[in-house]
Image: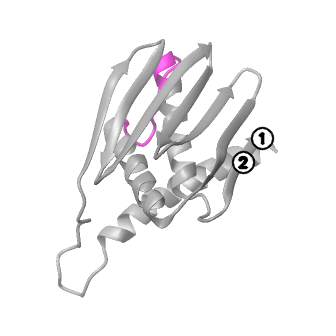
Amino acid sequence: MRRLIIVCGFVVALGVNACGQAEQRTGEPGEAPQQPASESALEVEQESDDGLAGVFRHDATTVEFGAASTGEGAANARITWDEREVTANRDRAKQQFAWSGGDAVLTTEDRTVLRSLARAFQVQWGPAAGGGPSGVADQRDLLLRLSMLLAEAPLGVPLGDHTG
């Protein structure tokens, strides 16, 4: 079961990247790729072994995000926008992962913002946000994975509590 979760996360990561690339390739043959007509900005306000926090702005939507180390190989993360909050907790040593969508229901606009957030994290931290045993790597990795999960979450369905 745990391998299935890891594989699903990897597939979601590939899907987000493929979706981003496909969006840029649309248009008539011979035309330059269309660029999204939106403004996005990622600001990491704090980043240390203890915690990570920042803001992402996409058009009129502001997304707040944060993560904290809760022990060696353990972290929690949160992504908040439009009075909705999604959280995740992971403990590598115990092989536990849980996330809660707070019964948020995603719209098409939410998906656009969350896909942009996932792409911004990938650009800021690279495709493998982890890369070491430090708390910062765990925090980045969990935030990136949570953003990718949300970017592909079903529209119109309440996001409940999930454990694995």
Q: How is the image coloured?
A: one colour
Most foreground residue, 22 or 84? 84
Task: Say which residue appears at 50% left-offset and 38% top-offset.
Answer: 79
Residue extent of the magenta highlight:
125-137
Task: Say which residue appears at 26% left-offset and 65% top-offset.
Answer: 36
Which amino acid does the dot numbered 2 rest on? Answer: Gly
Pointer 2: what residue? 160
Most foreground residue, 38 or 137? 38
Assign a secondary structure to mark 1.
Answer: helix
**Residue situated furthest bottom in the rendering:** 29
Task: Decide if residue 91 is on the left or right side of residue 79.
Answer: right
Residue 28 position (above or below residue 65): below
Of callouts 1 and 2, the N-terminal one: 1
Task: Decide if residue 89 is on the left or right side of residue 119.
Answer: right
Task: Decide if residue 16 is on the left or right side of residue 11.
Answer: left
Task: Say which residue appears at 77% left-offset and 41% top-offset.
Answer: 2
Residue 83 lies within the magenta run: no
Task: Give the x, y percent position of residue 92.
Answer: 68, 25
Pointer 1: what residue? 2
